[in-house]
């Protein structure tokens, strides 16, 4: 899976889970269907939100985006559906072109420790996948332990 495909999948998933969360809120507050729609939509959205932000950092480092671009990509997850036009903008600018950078090049940034660690991890896709899932799951588990924004009703 290329950086483009990985980023796009999470970008679309983030927009889909916004829809689930908004639908859940309508079901809870307008249709008086109880808490479960927001619980389901909120869980899905929270999980994909964390995965999207993690993906934005991973892809951004691979694609050598400036830190400002990586932060911008992450911030798009806070606004419903903004990940989609941002993805299109990245596509137009060629910011998603290319494959995963598994070997060093003559680029001056390739000697930086972050890029060295990134290449090391990209050369171990199973380990990287496990670490990705553990990282996202760990944050999600912590957030579930802490509780929802605004506290429990």
Image (tube, rainbow, N blue to C red):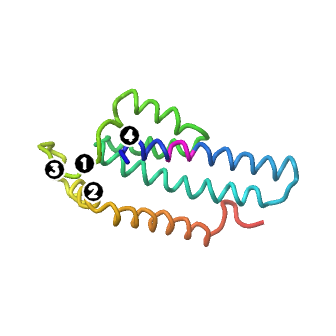
Distance (Cα) linking label 3 and label 2: 11 Å
Q: How many residues crowd mark 3 within 10 Å: few (<14), some (14–19), many (20+)?
A: few
Distance (Cα) linking label 1 and label 2: 8 Å
Of badges 4 and 3, nearer the viewer stands 3
Answer whether labels 1 and 2 touch (C-beta < 8 Å).
yes
| Earlier-in-chain disc, 4 versus 2 | 4
Give the residue displayed 66% in from the left and 60% down from the top.
149
Question: Seen in the image, is 95 located left or right of residue 80?
Answer: left
Please provide the residue range marked out in magenta: 10-14
Q: Secondary structure at mark 2?
A: helix
| Earlier-in-chain disc, 4 versus 1 | 4
Answer whether labels 4 and 1 touch (C-beta < 8 Å).
no
Residue 40, horizontal then vertical, whole percent = 70, 59
**Viewer-proximal residue among 83 and 76:** 83
Q: Secondary structure at mark 3?
A: loop
Question: Seen in the image, is 96 located left or right of residue 33?
Answer: left
Q: Dot 2 corresponds to which residue?
A: 118
Of badges 4 and 1, nearer the viewer stands 1
Q: Dot 1 corresponds to which residue?
A: 101
Q: Dot 4 corresponds to which residue?
A: 69
């Amino acid at each position: 899976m290329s950086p483009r495909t990985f980023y796009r999948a999470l970008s679309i998933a983030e927009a889909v889970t916004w829809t689930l969360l908004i639908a859940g809120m309508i079901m809870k507050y307008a249709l008086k269907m109880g808490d479960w729609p927001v619980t389901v939509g909120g869980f899905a959205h929270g999980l994909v939100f964390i995965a999207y932000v993690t993906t934005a950092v991973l892809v951004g480092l691979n694609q050598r985006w400036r830190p400002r671009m990586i932060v911008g990509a992450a911030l798009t997850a806070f606004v419903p559906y903004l990940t989609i036009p941002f993805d299109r903008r990245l596509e137009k600018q060629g910011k998603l072109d290319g494959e995963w950078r598994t070997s060093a090049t003559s680029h001056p940034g390739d000697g930086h420790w972050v890029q060295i660690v990134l290449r090391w991890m990209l050369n171990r896709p199973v380990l990287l996948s496990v670490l990705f899932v553990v990282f996202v799951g760990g944050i999600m588990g912590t957030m579930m332990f802490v509780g929802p924004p605004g506290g429990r009703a």
